[in-house]
Amino acid sequence: MMELEPRDLPPTGPKKSDGASTQWRTRSSTLHNRAILLLSSSDILIIGLVFTLAAIVCGASGYGWVIFTTALIPTYAVIAMGNHAFHSYALSNPFTAIVKSCRSLVASVGLLILIAFYLKSADFFPRLTISVGSAATLFCLAIGRYFIVPRLSRLIGGNPFNAILIRDGNEAVPPGDFSIVIMAESFFDPDVHDPLTYDRLASSLMLADRVVVACPAERRASWTQALQGAHIQAEIIVDELRPLSPIGLGPDRNAPSVIVAIGPLSLPNRAVKRLFDLVVATLALILLAPLMVVVTVLIKIDSPGPVLFKQARIGRGNRLFNIYKFRSMRTEACDKNADRLTARNDDRVTRIGKFLRKTSIDELPQLIQVLTGRMSLVGPRPHATGARAASKLYWEVDQRYWSRHAAKPGLTGLAQIRGYRGNTEFEDDLLNRLSSDIEYLQSWSFWRDLKILFLTFRVIFHQNAF
């Protein structure tokens, strides 16, 4: 475990005491992917081999058992992902891993048998082979995970799950397996609300799977507020809970902690949302390419300057990123920080810009950012760092504002289809959007994304689009 001041942390990791630069480990995503690949390959190999041996021992004839085994492998893979059989807790605890894999296999076999029954093809599959194969596979999956999970770090070249401890003040380092300890002093103050500060926090946590904060009791609420949009599982140490031996809180029972935030969507949900983004954004770019070429020409004819406008926005995990739009204002009048929001009949907007903003065509370049993974089709709209509501910066109106960044920013969102768009002259203009964004994060579903995307076409020509 390493203890560092924030100034000692380069972008890629800490430094050794002798000054030599090193990463404390391979990227979390790389090791995590290796772990998932190793375990999934092991599970698939076990299923295939065991059912083959069961067919030989039971003297199965025909190809029924081959078809069943072939269908079982992808079914198991999907159900196992949905059952979090490859989640960080499962990959760090052999008994949890065994339970989740065995449950997934039982559910998979049961589902296939049910399908065969309804298709009236149950007689085609050798019952003895399937019964023996299923029972033997359960046993072998348990044995496989029992031996692989404890040795996972050695097999894949490092611990795939990093835990960061943030010490606020003179709080003692609690028991636990922490990859690194960061001192909050002169690095991040949860009572100071500033995009650059939050961006620095997000950059420090980007390689972690879990962050734990040890802080004075009076600072817990502030840290909770700060971490709820960090796009990572965040926990606050509550030492008073130690005598209670709580269940269902943080994973380290020796240092009881309250989970105050969760990370991204589950792996299956992330995969579905990302695949949807890729397919729709690709098709949209192909279909809209002629329109975007025409818009490019019209912008160049209408006023001198670049075709695209770049502006820093607050993205997922409160990290800053550059958003791109078709330029709709005169180059010398563009407001990089959005200190002055666009008003109706704004003299800075060009002739073609009025049309682009009215029809939301100026947002089309963001489809490319959806492809690159910086944005999503649906999510909270990203805001500029200088945006204000009733002369107050957005986070000064409501500190829940930082929580809305727990997901990728979107081209459209729940707030937009409800008509909450345009200038924020009053605090309620922001609060309505904020409530919608938080509601979206708390009740995400693929079908809701589809509905929001469909309903967006109703509000493209909105009275507040100017």
Image (cartoon, rainbow, N blue to C red):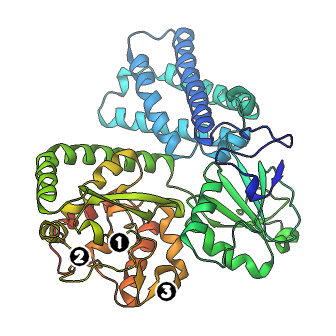
Q: Which is closer to the viewer, label 3 or label 1?
A: 1
Q: Quadrant of residue 196?
A: bottom right
Q: Counting residues from the N terminus, which is met first, the one under dot 3 or under dot 1?
A: 1
Q: Quadrant of residue 449?
A: bottom left
Residue 380 in the image: state x and y as whole percent: 39, 67
On screen, residue 204 versus residue 390, left or right, reads right
Residue 79 lies, with reference to residue 184, above or below; the image says above
**Residue wearing tag 1:** 335
> Label 3 is placed on what type of residue?
Val
Residue 175 in the image: state x and y as whole percent: 87, 56
On screen, residue 363 versus residue 388, left or right, reads left
Label 2's element?
loop
Labelled pair 1, 2 in contact (Cβ < 8 Å): yes
> Label 2 is placed on what type of residue?
Arg
Label 1's element?
loop
Nearest to the observer: residue 376 or residue 22: 22
> Label 1 is placed on what type of residue?
Asp
Residue 116 lies, with reference to residue 384, above or below; the image says above
On screen, residue 206 versus residue 441, left or right, reads right
Q: Marks 3/2: CA distance?
A: 27 Å
Residue 120 in the image: state x and y as whole percent: 30, 31
Q: Which mark is residue 348?
A: 2
**Residue wearing tag 3:** 397
Can residue 463 be seen here? The reply is yes
The mark total stands at 3
Label 3's element?
helix
Q: Which is closer to the viewer, label 3 or label 2?
A: 2
Residue 417 in the image: state x and y as whole percent: 26, 72
Which residue is found at the position 31% from the left and 37% from the top?
A: 118
On screen, residue 77 versus residue 100, left or right, reads left
